[in-house]
Structures are given as structure tokens and as C-alpha cells.
Image (cartoon, rainbow, N blue to C red):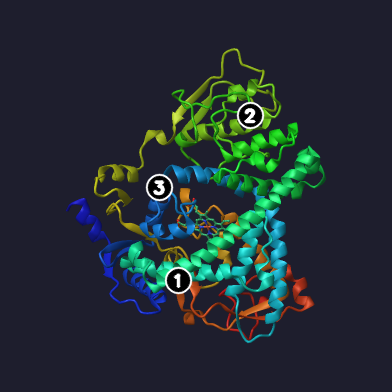
């Protein structure tokens, strides 16, 4: 059997036969769920002449998500280009590498800390807003949560107080809803993939109209932000020392700094020189240094550093942003938010630099070097160990040299799955998925996380609300992947988790939450994000003083936190 025939045989085939009725999107979700139950494994769904491969087992998920080679998004994502452009989510290749490296430091813990306050403020507004729904027999929380998310994202990423929640509506969120729904419909109707046809349909016209609303909104936020930053920048230059400010109000400055960086990036994108914003006042030394750091942040891997250190690869070729590959999606940065890796640090040069500012860089580079070496080799020593506490390595040398022994990790054995990958190599069939499965090149692969998270083997009694299951390690490293995994995982997952925790804690502290909709009555639909057709209907009751004093004991799904009259609050 040729590899090709083998691969197709290994996947079950199914065909989506129906013509598109009005509620097409929800029907599609139901249909896919049914196929998942039928096949209990991976399958191919034919949409007209296009095969779509659905994976829902952790092994296959791992094969795709852990790959550094197969990082291209599926062709369906191209339908979002007109909306999202080719930013981090949709881009690929060098562009994606560069953007990912650029943005990763913006999600560092130090930065996340500054997001805490705006998240809490917005959540307080939400909790107040929810009081209007007290003792309501059921209200849809979904639109309210969309506004909350929008406010949080605007405030944390752009430092812009949008106030969508206070104003109770937002043309932007409505437009997002419409555009998302149309995008999903378009995805399922292959003939609408062609712009020339799509633009002439009613759906296409609505799509472009709503897109305009969204674009106007995002531009207005960027402009408002730019104006604010220009004012702040002028004020900073007048003060002539940013560091003084840092001493008196460090938190606000960190926030301002982050916003400034975002703005400078925008300024760079539009060829809007930063100096225009900074005004003509001569900047102080402190400001110059900070700018230098910003510059590094803008170009995490610059060709030269302040001490004229040329960054070169092993063959002495100077490195720039375009020829550096990304190993890690968590790029370490130091306290000044400088992204560091062993490509942009030449340890010896740093050690010899008279500049004390390089100390942190040096420490970081040591850590990285050690980690990288240990990843590849088992290191031993024939002399007694010395560490930095007893012998600082900047001046001390051992006369006999530093004698080490190295062994290749895993004794140089290539794991069996890599062997399989090599032996099955075929120009037509480039994606090696598992030992017995290959997927034809050019096929879209969908990771069906919804179904994968319901596999009893990995999640016993999958529909039971049992937070304790997260206390133990999962059987498979790719069993639980709500934020995807591997190099293209969600860059904002820590932000998302943090805001969810704040939201849930603050809501439960004040209200007893219930739901009138039984899980079996949900009509789930995939509008880019998962939605229920009838909304997310909740009931709220004021939690009494006594209850709220027991907030630390609260956990969702326990009787104390539930309205016994309501069916369940597991749906949260
Ligand atoms: C509960 C909330 C969230 C969930 C469940 C989630 C989930 C995901 C998933 C599954 C992906 C991979 C998509 C793909 O492979 O096509 C992704 C990517 C991404 N997410 Fe999130 N996300 C969440 C919140 C956020 C937030 C708050 C941000 C930004 C502040 C964010 C920014 C991104 C970006 C930029 C990517 C693309 C990363 C890349 O391709 O390098 N996400 N997210």
C-alpha cells in the first residue's frame, strides 16, 4: 500500500451533504460533533471538493501543535485577512517569527502585574452592572461579557478607557459578532471563498459594511492613544528625567512605559518617527538609555548593541531579525524588559564591558547558556565543582582550565517517531502525524479541542464538574490544550487566565449564580468562538453577608455557591 492510500485509509471519510439553510453554522457544529461520536477518532470531512482533516486525539494533536515546521495557519484563516490583516494570529514564516518575538515580552509577568489594576476596575464596573439583573428570571450574560472583555483588552493593551460597559452597547462588538458569523458561513461555502463572488452577495456587502465600523473604531482607539502618549512624552521630556518619576510612582510609569512601547511600535509601523512625538527638547541620559532599551524591544535582536558588539552566528555571519530562528516561545527578559537570548549576548564581551548595566545581561546569558548546554548534553566535571557564590567567574580562572566531560543526551539515539517520519518522507505527503498516519500536503487540519476534552480516557466522567481533576498531571501532555500548545500557542493565555480568575472571584463574592438552561438544551455554535444560540442565560441572587465572608471556601458547583432552585451553575 502506498503511503498515500494508507493515509487516506487510516482516516474515516464523511461528507457534509446539506445545502446551507439559515442556521447553517449551528448545524455544522452539530454535524461535526455527530461525526466525532460516530468515528471516535480522527476523520476527514469533505466540504464539496475540499478535504478537511479533523484531529481529536492527543497524539495527533501533539504531532501538529508541537511542530516548528507546520506553523502555517489553514487556508480558512486567509478569509480573516481582510479583517485581521496578517498579524500574529494569521501570519507565518519570518513575519510571524519576528512578530512573536517582538510581542512575547509584552506578556511578561512584570507587565501582567500592571494589568491587574485595570482588570479589577473593569470587573468592579461589571459587578455593579450585574446588579440590574438581580432576581431576574434569566438574562443573557454573553453581550455583557463581550463588552467587559473589550474594556479589559482596550485598557490593558492600549491603556485606553473605552467605557463600553458603562455605555451598555458598542457598535464595535455588534460588528464583530456579525463579521464572525459571516466568516464562519463563508468558510463553509467554498464558492464564497472567492472575493469576486462574495463581494456581490448580500452577505458580502454586510460583511464589508460592518468591517468598516470595526476599522473606524480601532483607528479611533489608536489615534486617541497616540495623542495621549504624545502628551505624556512631552511631559516626560520636560521633566527631563524619567527615572525620578519611576521612583515616585513606579506602577503608573511601568504602565505608561508599556503603553509608550506599544505606541512607538505603531509609530514605527506608520513611519511616524518617535522623535516627532518626543518633541525637540534634548532628552536626558536616563531617557536615552530607556529609549535604547525600547529600541532593543522594538528590535529584540539588533545587529549592534551600545558597546558596538556585533552579533554573529557560529559562522561569523552578522545576525539580524531576518536570519534568527525562534527556539522558544517564552523569551526571557531581564528586569528592564530587554529580551535576552544567547543570540544577542556575547558573554565574553559583556564580562569585559565596563558598563555595570551589563551585569544583569551577563547573568541572564549565563543562565541561558547553561540551560541550553544542559538540554543537549549531560555535563560532568573531573575537578571539584565551583559556583558563583564561592568563586566569581569574572576574574577567577583555574590554571588547568575548566575540564568538563560531555555526553550526548539520550546517547544520540533518535526516537522511533522521528525515524518513522524520515522513512515515510514523500514529496506529496509532507505532514507526518503519527507512526501510521500521513496527511496529504495542502490539507487543512482542524484540532477538535471541544471533543478531545471529552475523551473519558483522559477526562474520566468528562461532563462532571470536577475541578480536582486539574490537581493531577494529565495522562498525555497534549490532552488539555484550551490555549493550543507548542510554538503557536496563545500568547495571551496568562492574561486570559488572570482576568477570568478576577471575574469569577468578584462575581461569586457578590452573587449566587445559577442557570436556567440545562446543558443538554444548549445549541452550541461555532462563531469563531464557541457560542450558544440562545445566549448564556443566568440568574443572579445577592449573596448575603454571611456567605460573602466565606468567600475563600467558595468553589463553583458546590452547594454553598449555588442557588438550589436553579438547575446548575456548572455551565459557567
Ligand atoms: C480564554 C481566552 C483565550 C483562549 C481560550 C485563547 C485560545 C487561543 C488559541 C486556541 C489559539 C491558537 C489559535 C490557532 O492555532 O489558530 C490562540 C492564539 C492566539 N491568542 Fe489566544 N486565547 C484567549 C485569549 C487571548 C488573549 C486575552 C489574547 C491577547 C491579549 C490572545 C492572543 C492570541 C494571539 C495573538 C494568538 C496567536 C499566537 C500566534 O499565532 O503566535 N488570546 N489563542
- Residue 197 is tagged as none
Badge 1 vs badge 3, beta-carbon distance below 8 Å: no
Q: Residue at x 65, y 51 (%)?
A: 226
Residue that carries the numbered disc 1 in the rendered image: 206
* Residue located at (39% from left, 70% from top): 185
Viewer-closest of 43 and 151 = 151
- Say if 532 sits above or below 252 in the image: below
Q: Residues within 10 Å of mark 2 (few under 14, many from 20)?
A: many
Q: CA distance from mark 3 to mark 2?
A: 31 Å
Q: Which one is earlier in the sequence, the residue at label 1 or at label 2? A: 1
Secondary element under disc 2, as helix, strand or loop, is: helix
Residue 169, compared with residue 479, is above or below; it is below
Relative side of 474 to 231, left or right:
left
> Could you tell me which residue is drawn at 57 percent across and 13 percent down?
400
Between disc 1 and disc 2, the foreground one is 1
Q: Which numbered disc flags the more N-terminal residue, 1 or 3?
A: 3
51 on left or right of 406: left
Q: Quadrant of residue 472?
A: bottom right
Query: 524 left or right of 145?
Result: left
Q: Which residue is mark 2?
A: 362
Q: Of the numbered discs in the image, which one, if any, rests on residue 67?
A: 3
- Front one among 403 and 220: 220
Q: CA distance from mark 1 to mark 3?
A: 38 Å
Residue 312 drawn above or below residue 276: above
Q: How many marks?
A: 3
The residue lying toward the viewer, choosing from 565 and 516, is 516
Q: Position of residue 520 (x, y in %)?
A: 47, 81
Counting from the top left corner in percent of width and height, residue 210 is at 50, 68
Amino acid at each position: 500500500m502506498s503511503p498515500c492510500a494508507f493515509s487516506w485509509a487510516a482516516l474515516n471519510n464523511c461528507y457534509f451533504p446539506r445545502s446551507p439553510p439559515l442556521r447553517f453554522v449551528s448545524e455544522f457544529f452539530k454535524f461535526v460533533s455527530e461525526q466525532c461520536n460516530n468515528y471516535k477518532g480522527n476523520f476527514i470531512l469533505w466540504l464539496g471538493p475540499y478535504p478537511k482533516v479533523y484531529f481529536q486525539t492527543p497524539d495527533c494533536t501533539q504531532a501538529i501543535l508541537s511542530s516548528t515546521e507546520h506553523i502555517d495557519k489553514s487556508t480558512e484563516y486567509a478569509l480573516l485577512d481582510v479583517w485581521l490583516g496578517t498579524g500574529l494570529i494569521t501570519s507565518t514564516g519570518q513575519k510571524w517569527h519576528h512578530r512573536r518575538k517582538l510581542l512575547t515580552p509584552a506578556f511578561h509577568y512584570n507587565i501582567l502585574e500592571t494589568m491587574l489594576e485595570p482588570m479589577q476596575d473593569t470587573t468592579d464596573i461589571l459587578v455593579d452592572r450585574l446588579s440590574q439583573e438581580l432576581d431576574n428570571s434569566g438574562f443573557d450574560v454573553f453581550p455583557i461579557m463581550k463588552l467587559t472583555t473589550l474594556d479589559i483588552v482596550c485598557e490593558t493593551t492600549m491603556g485606553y478607557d473605552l467605557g463600553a460597559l458603562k455605555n451598555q452597547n458598542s457598535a464595535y462588538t455588534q460588528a464583530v459578532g456579525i463579521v464572525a458569523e459571516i466568516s464562519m458561513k463563508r468558510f463553509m461555502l467554498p464558492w464564497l471563498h472567492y472575493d469576486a463572488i462574495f463581494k456581490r452577495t448580500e452577505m458580502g456587502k454586510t460583511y464589508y459594511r460592518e468591517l468598516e465600523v470595526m476599522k473606524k473604531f480601532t483607528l479611533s482607539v489608536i489615534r486617541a492613544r497616540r495623542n495621549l502618549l504624545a502628551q505624556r512624552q512631552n511631559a516626560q521630556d520636560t521633566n527631563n528625567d524619567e527615572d525620578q518619576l519611576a521612583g515616585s510612582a513606579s506602577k503608573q510609569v511601568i504602565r505608561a512605559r508599556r503603553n509608550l512601547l506599544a505606541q512607538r511600535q505603531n509609530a514605527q509601523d506608520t513611519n511616524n518617527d518617535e522623535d516627532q512625538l518626543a518633541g525637540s527638547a534634548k532628552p536626558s541620559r536616563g531617557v536615552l538609555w530607556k529609549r535604547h532599551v525600547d529600541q532593543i524591544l522594538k528590535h529584540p535582536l539588533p545587529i549592534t548593541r551600545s558597546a558596538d558588539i556585533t552579533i554573529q552566528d557560529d559562522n561569523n555571519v552578522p545576525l539580524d531579525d531576518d536570519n534568527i530562528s525562534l527556539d522558544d516561545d517564552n523569551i526571557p527578559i531581564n528586569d528592564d524588559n530587554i529580551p535576552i537570548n544567547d543570540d544577542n549576548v556575547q558573554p565574553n564581551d559583556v564580562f569585559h564591558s565596563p558598563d555595570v548595566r551589563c551585569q544583569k545581561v551577563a547573568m541572564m546569558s549565563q543562565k541561558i547558556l547553561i540551560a541550553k548546554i544542559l538540554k543537549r548534553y549531560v555535563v560532568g566535571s573531573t575537578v571539584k565543582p565551583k559556583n558563583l557564590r564561592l568563586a566569581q567567574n569574572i576574574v577567577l580562572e583555574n590554571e588547568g582550565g575548566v575540564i568538563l566531560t560531555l555526553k550526548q543526551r539520550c546517547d544520540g539515539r533518535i526516537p522511533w517517531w522521528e525515524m518513522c517520519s524520515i522513512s515515510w518522507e514523500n514529496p506529496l505527503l509532507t505532514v507526518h502525524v503519527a507512526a501510521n498516519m500521513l496527511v496529504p500536503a495542502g490539507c487543512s487540519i482542524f484540532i477538535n479541542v471541544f471533543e478531545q476534552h471529552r475523551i473519558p480516557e483522559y477526562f474520566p466522567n468528562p461532563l462532571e464538574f470536577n475541578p480536582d481533576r486539574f490537581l493531577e498531571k494529565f495522562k498525555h501532555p497534549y490532552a488539555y490544550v484550551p490555549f493550543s500548545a507548542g510554538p503557536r500557542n496563545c500568547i495571551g493565555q496568562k492574561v486570559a487566565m488572570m482576568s477570568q480568575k478576577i471575574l469569577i472571584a468578584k462575581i461569586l463574592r457578590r452573587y449566587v449564580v445559577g442557570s436556567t438552561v440545562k446543558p443538554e438544551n444548549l445549541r452550541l455554535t461555532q462563531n469563531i468562538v464557541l457560542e450558544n444560540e440562545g445566549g448564556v442565560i443566568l440568574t443572579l441572587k445577592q449573596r448575603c453577608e454571611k456567605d460573602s465572608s466565606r468567600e475563600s471556601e467558595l468553589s463553583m458547583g458546590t452547594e454553598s455557591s449555588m442557588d438550589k432552585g436553579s438547575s446548575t451553575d456548572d455551565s459557567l
